[in-house]
Image (cartoon, rainbow, N blue to C red):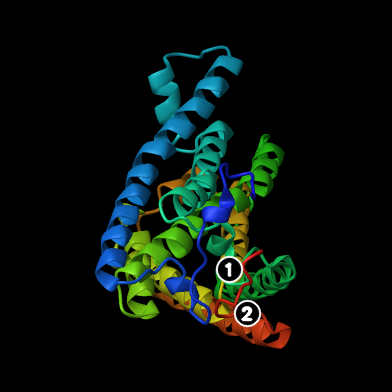
C-alpha cells in the first residue's frame, strides 16, 4: 500500500492514458461522464477561489493587525491594507493566492483520483531544470522589452523609507502568488476545461477568458493584454507539457512589475490598475510571444515530455 503526503491509499489513484497532452490529463471515458465530472471540478475550483482567498487573506491581515497594536478597527485596516497601501496587504494577498496551489492539488487528488504530480506536468512532476532555464530567459526578454518600450519615457525613481521591506516582501511572496495563479488558471482550470472539450485549444481559450475576466474592471487594451498573456501561457503549457515555463514567465513579470513600482510610483498604483494603452499592450504581447517561442525551443532542446508516458503498475 502506498501512503503519501496527500493522505490515504494512493494505490487507488489512476493514471491518465499514455500519449495525451497536458489538457487531457484528467479526461476520462466515456466523454459524457468526463464532462459531468469536469463541470463539477470547475465549480469546486471557482468556489474555492472565491471562498478560500478571502479567508486566508483575512487571517493573515488579522495577525498583522494584532502585531501592529490594533490600529483603528480591523475593517478599516483590512480595507486600507488590501489597497496595498501597506506591505501587510500585499503579503496577505500573495499568500492567499499562493494557497491555490494546495487547493488545486487536493482537488486533483480527491475529486479526480489522480496524483497531484500530474498537475505539474505530463512527466509527471515538476521539471526544475527546465523551470530555471525558462526563468533566466524570461528575466532577459521581459526586462529587455520593458526598457526598450520605455526608452523615450524612462520610469522615475522615488525615495521611500520602507522600500527595502517592500522589495523583500516582493521577492519572497510574488513568486508564490504567480505560481498560485498558474496552478489555478493554467493548471487545474485548464485541465477541467480539457475534460469538457474535444481538444486542448478550446480549454486554453476558456482558461484565458476566465483569467482575464477575474481581474475585475479594466479597459479594452488591458483586457486584451491579460487575455493575451493567458492565451500564450496556456499554449505554452500544452506545447511543453507542463506549468514550468508559464510559472517562470509569470514570476519574472510580477516580481519586476511590483519591484519597479516599489521604487517608483508605489505598489498601490499597480494594485488599482484598470487602464492601459494599445501601445503598452502591443509591447507586452511581443514580450510574451518571444518568451513563448524561446521556452518552446528550450524545451525541444532539453527533450522534455509533452505527452503522458506509459507507466508501470508500481510507479
Residue at the spot 53% in from the left edge and 46% down from the top edge:
102
Whether 77 is drawn above or below 250: the answer is: above
Place of residue 285 in the rendered image (x, y in percent of width and height, measured from the top left):
47, 77
Residue at the spot 40% in from the left edge and 47% down from the top edge:
272
- Determine which of the numbered discs, if any, sits on residue 31 in the image: none
Place of residue 8 in the rendered image (x, y in percent of width and height, measured from the top left):
56, 42
- The secondary element bearing badge 2 is classed as loop
Mark positioned earlier in the residue sequence (1 or 2): 1
Place of residue 1 in the rendered image (x, y in percent of width and height, measured from the top left):
64, 49
Whether 312 is drawn above or below 271: the answer is: below
Q: Are marks 1 and 2 in contact (CB under 8 Å)?
A: yes
Whether residue 262 is visible here, answered yes or no, is: yes
Q: Which residue is mark 2?
A: 305
Q: Quadrant of residue 166?
A: top right
Relative horizontal placement of residue 235, taking residue 118 as reference (left or right): left
Q: Which residue is mark 1?
A: 121
Q: Quadrant of residue 11?
A: bottom right
Amino acid at each position: 500500500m502506498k501512503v503519501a503526503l496527500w493522505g490515504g491509499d494512493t494505490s487507488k489513484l489512476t493514471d491518465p492514458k499514455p500519449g495525451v497532452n497536458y489538457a487531457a490529463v484528467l479526461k476520462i471515458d466515456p466523454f459524457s461522464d468526463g464532462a459531468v465530472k469536469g463541470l463539477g471540478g470547475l465549480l469546486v475550483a471557482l468556489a474555492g477561489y472565491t471562498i478560500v482567498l478571502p479567508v486566508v487573506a483575512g487571517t493573515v491581515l488579522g495577525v498583522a493587525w494584532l502585531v501592529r497594536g490594533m490600529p483603528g478597527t480591523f475593517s478599516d485596516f483590512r480595507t486600507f491594507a488590501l489597497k496595498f497601501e501597506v506591505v501587510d496587504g500585499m503579503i496577505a494577498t500573495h499568500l492567499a493566492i499562493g494557497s491555490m496551489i494546495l487547493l488545486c492539488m487536493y482537488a486533483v487528488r480527491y475529486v479526480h483520483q489522480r496524483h497531484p504530480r500530474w498537475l505539474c506536468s505530463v512527466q509527471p512532476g515538476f521539471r526544475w531544470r527546465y523551470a530555471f532555464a525558462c526563468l533566466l530567459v524570461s528575466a532577459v526578454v521581459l526586462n529587455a522589452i520593458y526598457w526598450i518600450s520605455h526608452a523615450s519615457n524612462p520610469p522615475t525613481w522615488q525615495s521611500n523609507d520602507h522600500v527595502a521591506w517592500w522589495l523583500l516582501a516582493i521577492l519572497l511572496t510574488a513568486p508564490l502568488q504567480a505560481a498560485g495563479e498558474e496552478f489555478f488558471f493554467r493548471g487545474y482550470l485548464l485541465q477541467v476545461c480539457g475534460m469538457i472539450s474535444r481538444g486542448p485549444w478550446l480549454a486554453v481559450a476558456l482558461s484565458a477568458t476566465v483569467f482575464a475576466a477575474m481581474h475585475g474592471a479594466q479597459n479594452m487594451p488591458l483586457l486584451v493584454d491579460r487575455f493575451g498573456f493567458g492565451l500564450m501561457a496556456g499554449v505554452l503549457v500544452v506545447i511543453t507539457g507542463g506549468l514550468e515555463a508559464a510559472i517562470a514567465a509569470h514570476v519574472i513579470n510580477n516580481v519586476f512589475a511590483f519591484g519597479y513600482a516599489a521604487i517608483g510610483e508605489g505598489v498601490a498604483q499597480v494594485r488599482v490598475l484598470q487602464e492601459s494603452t494599445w501601445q503598452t499592450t502591443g509591447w507586452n504581447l511581443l514580450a510574451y510571444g518571444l518568451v513563448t517561442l524561446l521556452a518552446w525551443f528550450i524545451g525541444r532542446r532539453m527533450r522534455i515530455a509533452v505527452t503522458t508516458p506509459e507507466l508501470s503498475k508500481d510507479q
